[in-house]
Image (cartoon, rainbow, N blue to C red):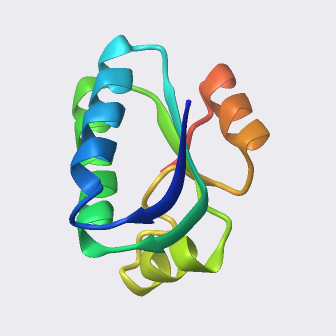
Amino acid sequence: MAHVIGAIDLLTARALRMCVDDHLDAGQGMVVDLSRVDFLAAAGLTVLTDTDRRAKLDNRAWAIVANTRPVLRPLEVLGLVDKLPRYDSVPAAVAALRTGAVTS
């Protein structure tokens, strides 16, 4: 589980990528909680889409919690709301990972 706080922009996206890559490599499933993110820039969106692509190729389970306007709006604009494994709460995302019902 990664709880992300603040802005995901050009300066912070690399740290997010390293964290997600490390946890995804562990192979136990990964939830990225974006509920406290107040700005999601293109660099952050790239991390999310790259992670989704990699997870699918490596058959890894992962999910994001996106339930606030600063995160949902960029996902909506780019048509990613229904393409990424997005959930409204941490418990819902964790439950989906546990049951193998992650959808993207």
Closer to us: 72 or 56: 72
Dividing the image into 4 quarters, which one contains the N terminus?
top right
* On screen, residue 89 above or below 45: above
Q: Position of residue 81 (x, y in %)?
A: 51, 69
Q: Is residue 30 left or right of residue 78?
A: right
- What is the tally of numbered marks visible in this picture? 0
Q: Give residue 26's quadrant in the image.
A: top left
Q: Residue furthest bottom?
A: 77
Q: Is residue 25 left or right of residue 97?
A: left
Q: Residue at x 48, y 51 (%)?
A: 104
Closer to us: 56 or 70: 70
Q: Is residue 68 left or right of residue 103?
A: right
Q: Residue at x 41, y 78 (%)?
A: 79
Q: Residue at x 34, y 54 (%)?
A: 48
Q: Is residue 25 left or right of residue 31?
A: left
Q: Give residue 44's quadrant in the image.
A: bottom left
Q: Position of residue 99 (x, y in %)?
A: 68, 23
Q: Position of residue 5 (x, y in %)?
A: 54, 54
Q: Residue at x 55, y 78 (%)?
A: 70
Q: Position of residue 4 (x, y in %)?
A: 52, 49
Q: Give residue 31's quadrant in the image.
A: top right
